[in-house]
Amino acid sequence: MSLLSSGLFRHADFRRFWAADATSQTGAAVTLVALPLIAIGPLHATPFEAGLLVVFEYLAFLVIGLPAGAWVDRMRRRPVMITGSLCRAALLGSVPVAYGLGALTLPQLYGVAFGVSVCTVFFDVAHQSYLPQLVDDAALVEANVKLEATRSIAQVGGPGAGGALVGALSAPVAVVVDAVGFVGSALFLSCIRQTETKPPARPDASLRAEIGEGLRFVFGNPLLRALTLTGAISNMCGTIGASMLLVLLNGQLGLSPFLCGLVFTAEAAGGLLGSLLTVRVADRIGQGPAMCASVVTSGVLWMLALPMYQADGRFAVAVALQGLGWVCFMTFKINSVSVRQQLCPKPLLGRMTATNRFVVWGSMPIGALLGSTLGGTVGVRQAMWVGVLGELLAVLPVFFSPLRTMRRLPGAPPGAGEPGGAEPAAQASAATAPPAA
């Protein structure tokens, strides 16, 4: 089954939701390269200062992640997403304006990064909480596969194009593409026709009590607890390395912005291929074992890639290994999102998502701060070694949980994860080429 030949493609509102996500991801893929290169290039940031930018990019998940979930559960989700997209467009648009006036500084860049992260917290919580209202439970895995696949498609060309734009224009001007992408996302979301009812008011519920509900639900469930802790360890250790990656490639090895962008393009291409193989892999060996194998294999591949990052032919090997790591990791990523959505009662979706993001994404500014500190003291590549070795420990929570032996996870469609058995869409995908979920 191709991405365009399922029942969800005939779901008009899902198509608009899908297009909004893909549009914003395309722009964000450009900024993934452009913002750090602004810090490293025109603003002459040190390794610590460049790593600090990554801290601000994720800091809001740690600072307001938990209350955001309770707030979103009190509101309609679509207006939250539209507002978040437009605010991110305005914040990013301030970068080329300040650069053109000769007034761009690192503190402004940090402020923009933090402001964007605040908007992203609310957008992402609303996004994952809105999807189960838009499609049936039986279509959630298929919907998440499609969203991840198209995000990867958008990101395949985005970083490379971002590197080319930075080389042809400048990093600040390239950020305009991201701002335009967020405006387009808001327009697609505003065209969704399905009526969304406002959640019933709970005048007797305090913000503290609602946050507590989300925490108890996630950490009281052994499956959700294991998924959350694995995601947190992986993100923290991965961000230690990611915060120093462009410092190594551009700042120390002197690679061009285009070559730097190719690393992210390889990751996106690997993510696309991995998303298309996710259902098939889970059907072959079972969902739980597949998720464990996904985390271990991706960690090993990323560890092998690090010494290959050199300013010679070994760089191509590193890029290939980095991409293969993402092929493997997508099995864990997609299944964990779908399982969380399927296990959670709809009134708790915002708080569950916020709790997960608080722990999983909140670990990223901690990782970035560790990476920038280590990069400025023991060295850039040494900091990245700490990250990739720590990544191997991420499998422990899921390995020492019931997930390790569960062929079909609770809430999964009947037959998913059993040999020869999958939901109808997955069965069709296994019988046709190219493979897709």
Image: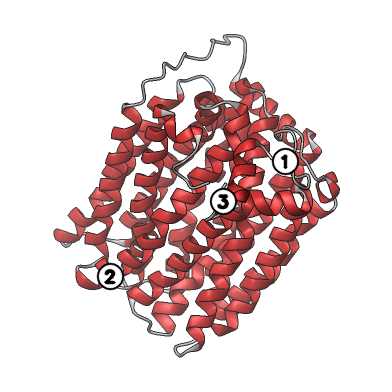
Q: State the mark number for residue 416.
A: 1
Helix, strand or loop under label 3: loop
385 above or below 70? below
Image coordinates of residue 424 in percent, x first then y, are 63, 36
On the image, numbered disc 3 is attached to which residue?
A: 432
Instruction: Identify the image quadrant of residue 189.
Output: top left
Instruction: Give the residue type at disc 3.
Output: Thr
- Mark 1 vs 3, N-terminal side: 1
Residue carrying label 2: 164
Dot 3: few (<14), some (14–19), or many (≥20) neighbours within 10 Å? few
Q: In this view of the protein, can residue 351 be seen by the observer?
A: no
Q: Are marks 3 and 2 in contact (CB under 8 Å)?
A: no
Residue at (43% x, 31% y) in the render: 10
Kind of residue indicated by mark 2: Ala
Color scheme of the displayed model: secondary structure
Position in image of residue 327 (x %, y %): 59, 62
Q: Look at the picture and state if 90 lies above or below 37.
A: above
Give the quadrant of residue 158: bottom left
Residue 203: image x %, image y %? Answer: 57, 9
Q: Amino acid at mark 1?
A: Ala
Which quadrant would residue 174 be assigned to in this image?
bottom left
Classify mark 2: helix, strand or loop. helix
Task: Specify the farthest residue to the front.
Answer: 431
Q: CA distance from mark 1 to mark 3?
A: 18 Å
